[in-house]
Image: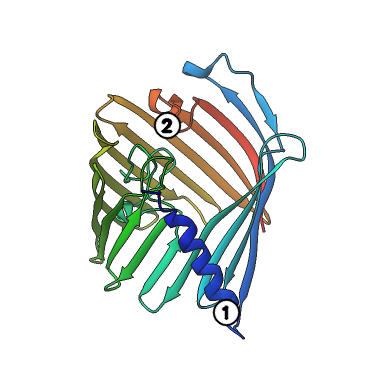
Amino acid sequence: MKAIKLASVFAVSAVAAAVSTATFAADAIITGEAGVEYTTYNGESKDTPDLADGTDLGELELHVDTGIVYAELEFATTGANEATKIGMEKLYVKQGAVSFGRFDGTVATGSFMGMDELFGGVDLVTAASDTDNTGVRYKVTPELTVALEATESTDDEDSDIGFALSYVKDFGFIKAGISGGSVGDANAVNVGFQTVSGPITVSLNYGVGEKGTGTTTDREQMTSSIAFAATDALTLTLEYSNELEKEMDGTYFIGEYVSGDLTYYVKNYAGDLAADSSTNGAEQTTVGVKTFF
């Protein structure tokens, strides 16, 4: 049977819904960042040459909301001279509590809280793809979202269609959530907790699941983070993540100081998890300055 290109169907539906409306109000917002930074490599990555970079620290995003269709188009520099990549990050239709199209994410990780630089929760991944690109979501209540999500098709396999849900509740002193789902032979369950005390925000996440098709691979991840707003201008954030199945761990730290229109920052990735290609790909320290617009 011919593989069904579900992602394409949803994309066309979203565009058709927009152009078929005779008159609508469209809010277009452009955001972005630009700057320069210097990176040194250490640990397992110490043999990598240091890098002074102003060519791949650039991004421009166009956000358009017609009330019926939401679109997010990204223009990003690649690091090569004058090279740019363009991507449709999000494109989905909104009809009351129902939305459908491309979301650039899965409901299965909806309970993840805090810094997600190394890990952002256990998602749904088969041998073909993840379910980030195509879905139908229904917001049952402000806390509960249920969804149908699909993988991409391949030359000889149809798209797999699965189910995901997320429930997140703010109890005042603590926010807690559970999310997960299943598609094909892949599955995921995530739990997240977050509490705020003055200038300190502490988050804890745990996720388990399986990825692949036929022969699957177990996944078990833990991520904790703490963010400290030292002043109105200075914020310090530390993430510790652990891939328990692979016995790999790593940290990510970022300190940011805002002065006027500029943000000065230092970032550090450390540990074998940070050096792994599945996360950052290198142990490194970066200092830089940038502005948001």
In the foreground, 164 or 242: 164
Q: In the image as oriented, which residue stretches furthest toward the bottom? A: 23
Picture residue at 49% right of the left edge, 25% below the top: 283
**Tag 2 residue:** 278
Secondary element at image label 2: loop
Give percent across and percent down for residue 73. 60, 58
Q: What sort of colour scheme is used for the picture?
A: rainbow
Residue 137 location, quadrant: bottom left
Give percent across and percent down for residue 281. 49, 28
Horizontal side, residue 131 vs residue 291: left or right? left
Q: Amino acid at mark 2?
A: Ser
- Classify the position of the C terminus by image quarter: bottom right
Give percent across and percent down for residue 148. 31, 60
In the foreground, 23 or 36: 23
Residue 78 location, quadrant: top right
Secondary element at image label 1: loop
**Tag 1 residue:** 20
- State yes or no: discs 2 and 1 in contact (Cβ < 8 Å): no
Q: Amino acid at mark 1?
A: Ser
Horizontal side, residue 283 vs residue 135: left or right? right
Picture residue at 24% right of the left edge, 30% below the top: 215
Using the image, determine if residue 66 lies above or below residue 260.
Answer: below
Cα distance in 3D space between marks 2 and 1:
42 Å
Dot 2, crowdedness within 10 Å: few (<14), some or many (≥20)? few
Tell me the mark number nearer the camera, choosing from 2 and 1: 1
Q: In the image as oriented, which residue stretches furthest toward the top? A: 47
Picture residue at 40% right of the left edge, 49% below the top: 2
